[in-house]
Image (tube, rainbow, N blue to C red):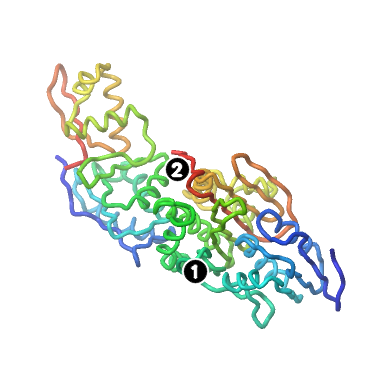
Amino acid sequence: MNNKLDMSILIKPSDNFLTSQNIEFFLTAVLRQPKGDITLDLSAVEFFDPYALVMLTLVVEDTAKGRRISVISPSSPTARSYLKRIGFRRDKAGAPETQTFALAEDPIMLKLTRISATDDIRAVIGAILAPVKSVLNRHLKYNDQDAANLLTALSELCQNIVDHAETSGLAAMQVYRSGRGASYAVLGVGDAGIGVRSSLAKRHDATEWNDQIAIRNALKPNFSRFTGRGLGLARVKEIAEKYAGKLIVRSGSGEISFQRTVSSRLCAPFAGTQICLFLRENKKLINSY
Amino acid sequence: MLTKTNSYKPEAKDGILVGRAAGKNLLDQLMGIIAASPAGSVIPLNFEKIRFIDFSSADEFLGKLVSRLLSGEFRDIYVCLEKMTPEVEETLDAALKLRGQNAVVLGADGAAKILGKINPVLKDTFDLINDLKELSARGLADKKGIAINASSNRLTKLQGLGLIARAGTSSGKGAEQYVYRTLVV
């Protein structure tokens, strides 16, 4: 539903949650506005996941260039408190502010964190290595190896920002408990950089590729713009499979998701690459080795 | 004759290795040591100071190390991994598997095992050599009741993967034959 209010286009999600399941619908409404100020009405939203917050932040930062983005905060005190704790805040310029690192022993394992260089990744891993192991052990029944695998995935996805995006990006990570009592971890990493197809095109002939083809190629071992590399995303996919999880890779106008089967869809065009990794608790482990 | 050298101990700030540049730095350091080592050296890679290694670092360090050792660039130089936490070992194992490579790991009990994907037949041969310390193709053929050609193939394959050393010859039935040795020295 779009209303013109004081020359600002109001956009409101149709659900009371914003997660990897529905963030795309909301963002499409935002991205399809060619010009003019926008107000994002989050007043009815009660639940966010890290991937949705990363996407939201990237879109707001990107579309803010040349126009004003306002955000109406959630009415729910719990949701407002959550957004504050995970670091989704607005600064004076109107773009969301990001913070670094996690609270120890908190299901928010990593606040919304800016990633610009490998040193940022090393600092993040160093800060959250011990508390993440503790949180995952308690909530997902993960041992230290399992926790290290999730952190490996985080590190690899953040490293892709540094190596390929040609701009900075964002990462956030959290543990949840579903209404059915199952625990799971969600990791959101994204950037508004050059995207998968442009990155791979620096070494491969991508003239015939669309974004979905580019993403599928990026997940193949040894497929990279750099010689002798290209195994990192393949490793992240292995980790998703090992923990019976889900991996979503979105870039440009394409999205591929892997969860037992592979599915793909077209999206509203948006720069860069955004990835969601969803891992289940230990009773769902699959031994892939 | 195989000689165990001093250990090379990868180090990183806070014990955390992240990113390809970190892996490359370690590789460059180790390459200097390897270049200065005589043929027949077994260099232990001691990971006791590493709390976490991400996949990029693991691939850049170990994956490229194994590639260079197997390229023939350095004659008869071997490495074995030791003192890893289970999580470090799993990441190194994943890096080797995705490259189709292998490495020898020394356990705390001195037993050797193979990291990376290996077929059961080669693993069985590897375990036998580690038990006996050295073995010829004739010796393996006699123990396993297999043809000498098959025996020779298994040993050559393991040696080609950098998991055992070919060290000298022995006089058996007929011509001289190679003797293969465990890297556990």
Which image quadrant for residue A185?
Answer: bottom right
Q: Nearer the viewer, mark 1 or mark 2?
A: 1
The front one of A211 and A124 is A124
Q: Which amino acid does label 2 sit on?
A: Leu
Give the quarter of the image for residue B103: top left
| Residue A69 coordinates in the image, percent (x, y) | 74, 74
In the displayed structure image, the side of residue A127 where residue B126 appears, left or right: left
Write down the quadrant of residue A39 in the picture: bottom right
State the CA–CA distance, disc 1 to disc 2: 31 Å
- Amino acid on which disc 1 is placed: Ala
Q: Please check whether the numbered discs 1 and 2 fall on a single chain.
A: no
Provide the secondary structure element on which disc 1 rests: loop
Dot 1: within a 10 Å radius of its alpha carbon, few (fewer than 14), some, or many (20 or more) residues? Answer: many
The residue identified by callout 1 is A102
Element type at mark 2: helix
- Horizontal placement of A198 versus A138: left or right? right
Vertical order, A120 against A270 (above or below): below
Marker disc for residue A33: none
| Chain hosting mark 1 | A
Side of A20 where B3 appears, left or right: left
Please count the marks in the image: 2
Q: Residue B98 carries which label?
A: 2
Q: In this view, does A92 lie above or below B80?
A: below
In the picture, the quarter occupied by the N terminus of chain A is: bottom right
**A77 shown above or below A166:** below
Which chain hosts label 2? B
Q: Which residue is drawn at 22% across and 40% down?
A: B111
Q: Which residue: 23% across, 20% down? A: B141
Give percent across and percent down for residue A289.
Answer: 43, 38
Q: Which of A171 and A79 is in front in this view?
A: A79
Farthest-out residue, bottom: A92
